[in-house]
Amino acid sequence: MPVYFDKQSKTWYCKFYYTDYTGARKQKKKRGFKLQREAKEWEHIFLLQKQGRPDMGFSSLYSLYMEDMTHRLRQSTLSSKAHLFRTKILPYFEKLPVNEIQASNIRQWQNKMTSYRTPDGKGYSQTYLKAMNNQLSAIFNYAVKYYCLPSNPCHTAGSIGRKKASEMDFWTQNEFFAFWKSLPEHSELSLVFSLLYYSGMRIGELLALETKDFHPTTGVISITKTLRRYKGENIVTPPKTPKGVREIRLPEFLVKNLKKYVFGRDISERIFSCSRHTIDRAMQKHCFLSGVKKIRIHDLRHSNASLLIEMGISPVLIAERLGHENVETTLNTYSHLYPGKQDEIAVQMQKLHEILQEKQFQSST
């Protein structure tokens, strides 16, 4: 692999041929290396990536993987994935050849992640540990499928963390009312938190709402998009899942308040101008002022689900209102909120049995 010295710029460069994925022979040239060794290393890594050999470095596999995912994932998902890799995975594996990473290496990494603590003693949540491990396993599955890696070492090492948190934070209706009373009356934030609590929509879905999405005559909000902040810009995309496109019927008091709030607005104007950061700060402030336990913005969605379950609404309707892909998602997420209903079911069945017995007794006499 010869490399060349540019006398004018006094730097090294490499120039070579390779075969791309279509079978075409192409030339590659890369300038600007201070050292001859750096130019040779760059050419070596480039060719390993193009050849797709399992002895490529983990950082090369990561580059290939992310380039592939760029065409398959939405930007918000891709940026979250990239952040997790850069901060939690690459620092440990980037210099290792992919085919030399063993289950023992995975276990050591898992131990570091599970034992990590901040200066105030906090570690990663069980669900975040699970997400880390899933991402690491996914990239090895990619290498097995497309780059001839014999097996995924994560399968031998086992997993860490849990898919669901052991406990879910949510507010009862009394807790929400105490929080809501501490907000400025008839304010934008008062309406924002009311919608989040009583509709169960995601924060991104709420911030993406335009005036045309509200139908005051029917009391319906149409969810067709979601908004997130990325590199200082608002990015609007379709909802998280196809079932996320839905209609939510609002209670009359919310219809009345929202109708006043959007009166005179242009149909394409966003209903709420506040940012997620503003809403999050307000939540922290008014949790303190009201004395209500602090929860996350997303936990208002859980609070809505809890309220609907307590009202006796069927899981099918809850799934439809929340925009879950299927009812199994609803049951898996909120199954721990249903045990309290078991006694109620048993009582109702006992009453039904007694009624039937009474009818049978009367008919026999």
Image: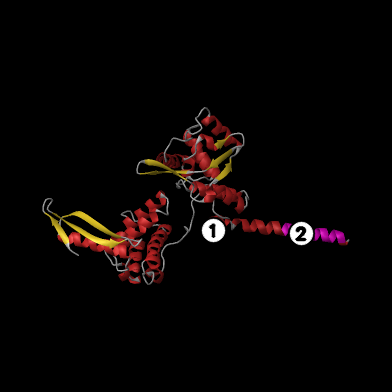
Residue range highlighted in magenta: 350-363
Front residue of 36/243: it is 36
Asked if residue 182 can be seen in this view, the reply is: no
Query: Measured from the top left, where is residue 275 in percent x and y?
Result: 41, 39
> In the rendering, which numbered label is found on residue 119?
none
**Secondary-structure class at tag 1:** helix
- C-alpha gap between disc 1 and disc 2: 33 Å
Residue annotated with mark 1? 332
Task: Name which residue type carries label 1.
Answer: Asn
Q: Is residue 185 above or below residue 94?
A: above
Residue annotated with mark 2? 354
Front residue of 178/48: it is 48
**For the point 84% across and 61% down, which residue is it?**
361
Front residue of 10/328: it is 10
Q: How is the image coloured?
A: secondary structure
**Secondary-structure class at tag 2:** helix
Magenta stretch, main secondary structure class: helix
Figure quadrant of the N terminus: bottom left
Q: Residues within 10 Å of mark 1 (few under 14, many from 20)?
A: few
Which label's residue is closer to the chain start, 1 or 2? 1
Query: Measured from the top left, where is residue 47 in percent x and y?
Result: 27, 63
In reply to whether residue 118 is colored magenta, the answer given is: no
**For the point 79% across and 61% down, which residue is it?**
357
Residue reaching furthest top?
264
Query: Measured from the top left, where is residue 332 in percent x and y?
Result: 54, 58
Q: Residues within 10 Å of mark 2 (few under 14, many from 20)?
A: few
